[in-house]
Image (cartoon, grey):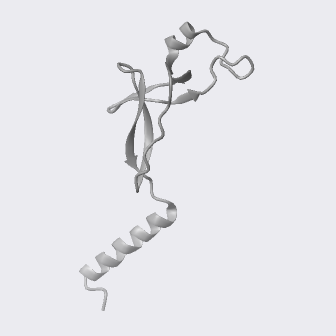
Amino acid sequence: MIFVGNFIQDEKGLRVGFIHHKPFDEKDGLGKTEEELLQIGALVDEIPEPEQKDGKIPVMYYDPENNKIYYEYEDKPLTPEERITQLEQALLELTMLLGGGN
């Protein structure tokens, strides 16, 4: 069993904020019973691998009706270099529109 918790409710569902792969392990576990864990989170059998989508990052969500994990995909934030390139391109386009490209 895998424990998921620290859910954050948003417009898409229950976003997973914490994962523990060995919640009942004597050494590395959470030190709680199954009942205690179910009061603060959920126990799932597996966590599927997210799909790889260009320009997107997977965000893990929990479906309490089916006791399953699923992913929503959000736009990947631009790196500082990508942002600079995007801004330079926009500035160049504006300059050309204003006739400053002569």
Q: Position of residue 36 (x, y in %)?
A: 56, 9
In the shown orientation, is residue 62 left or right of residue 38? left
How many numbered badges does the structure rendering display?
Answer: 0
The answer to whether 77 is drawn above or below residue 41 in the figure is: below
Q: Position of residue 15 (x, y in %)?
A: 43, 31
In what quadrant of the picture does the C terminus appear?
A: bottom left
Residue at the bottom extreme of this rendering: 102
Identify which residue is drawn at 32% across, 32% down.
11
Hey, which quadrant is residue 85 in on the image?
A: bottom left
Identify which residue is drawn at 55% across, 22% down.
3
In what quadrant of the picture does the N terminus appear?
A: top right
Identify which residue is drawn at 64% across, 23% down.
22
In the shown orientation, is residue 95 left or right of residue 38? left
Q: Position of residue 60 (x, y in %)?
A: 45, 35
In the shown orientation, is residue 79 left or right of residue 87? right
Residue at the right extreme of this rendering: 27
Q: Position of residue 29 (x, y in %)?
A: 68, 20
Identify which residue is drawn at 47% across, 30% down.
16
The answer to whether 21 is drawn above or below residue 36 in the figure is: below
The answer to whether 93 is drawn above or below residue 81 in the figure is: below
